[in-house]
Amino acid sequence: MSEKTKNTQLRVSPSDEELVKSAKIGDALAFEQLVQRYEEKIYNLIYRMVDDKTIVKDILQETFIKAYRSLPSFRENSKFSTWLYRIAINFCLMHARKKKKKTLPLDELIQTEEGEIPKDIPDWSSNPEATLQNKELKNKLESAISSLPDDYKSVLILRDIDGLSNKEVSKILNITVPAVKSRIHRAREFLRERLSEYFSRN
Amino acid sequence: MVNCKEIFELISDLIDEEIEIEEELHREFLEHISECPHCGPFLNTFKKTVNLCRRIENIRVPEEVHISFWRSIRVEIYKKKK
């Protein structure tokens, strides 16, 4: 192994915190690295949050430009990713408000009353069709997610698709952990019902 | 005795392992779930739904979006400060 490859392997990529510190004192390349790290994640978050896919690229730009301009005032008492997710979510919600999208409260979407367990549930969990390779099911799931009211959709995306903790989600959305837990629970149940419908029809 | 309603309410916490429940209560939960004609299928399909969500993969940023995005980012960060 040559010296050069050894060096490359030994080099540990800097943490977000280190990059933030460098970017704050004017290191543009450090900021570029942060952008590289989060471009795809933020793109996907926005893509799933908004209905109008033509505005995804605008919100993506707005998010990172806002992050760049606000960096001097980022106090680093949360993770950079939490802060960035929050900027992106706020832009998504702002655009949704502009469009005055009418959303039904989840109570109306979920037919069962809260706390009441639905009866006669077919168990499709071990059905070989219950996989994302099943394109029809995947589409059903994605469209069910996109039909969730924004408050629930954001929690579901961050919690179950991005795999963030309840605590991180609560910081990003500025709501309490119990509120995150209650929303994730109801969002999951909504999706479970939609998937059950799919299996009862097929 | 645990009932269906309790299972329903705690199911997200249970699968997220957020709550520490006493061993005895946990045994009661499992017993109930294995016997109850509603809770068993409910728990299984609920878990499956969460697992499907967790497996959703990110889509790649389309090339033309990626290019125009980077162009505007670079304009922003390399523009001369006044």
Image (spheres, rainbow, N blue to C red):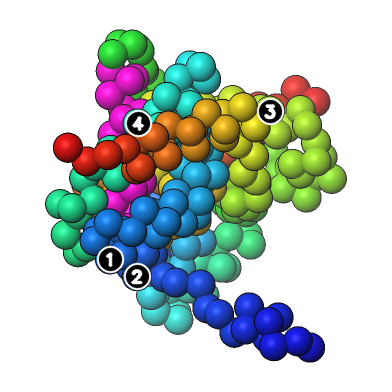
Q: Which residue is mark 4?
A: A62
| Residue at 50%, 44% in the rendered image | A39
| Mark closest to the chain's N terminus, 4 or 2 | 2
* Neighbourhood count class around disc 1 (C-alpha, 10 Å): few under 14, some 14–19, many 20 upward: some
| Residue at 42%, 56% in the rendered image | A29
Q: What is the three-letter code of the residue carrying label 1?
A: Lys
A174 shown above or below A55: below
The stretch of residues the image draws in magenta is: A78-97
Q: Which quadrant, please, contains the N terminus of chain A?
A: bottom right
| Mark closest to the chain's N terminus, 1 or 4 | 1
Q: Which residue is mark 3?
A: A139
Q: Nearer the viewer, residue A79 or A16?
A: A16
Do the CB atoms of the residues marked 1 and 4 lie less than 8 Å apart? no
* Image position, residue A141 (x, y; %): 63, 33
Q: Which mark is residue A21?
A: 1
What SS does tag 2 mark?
helix
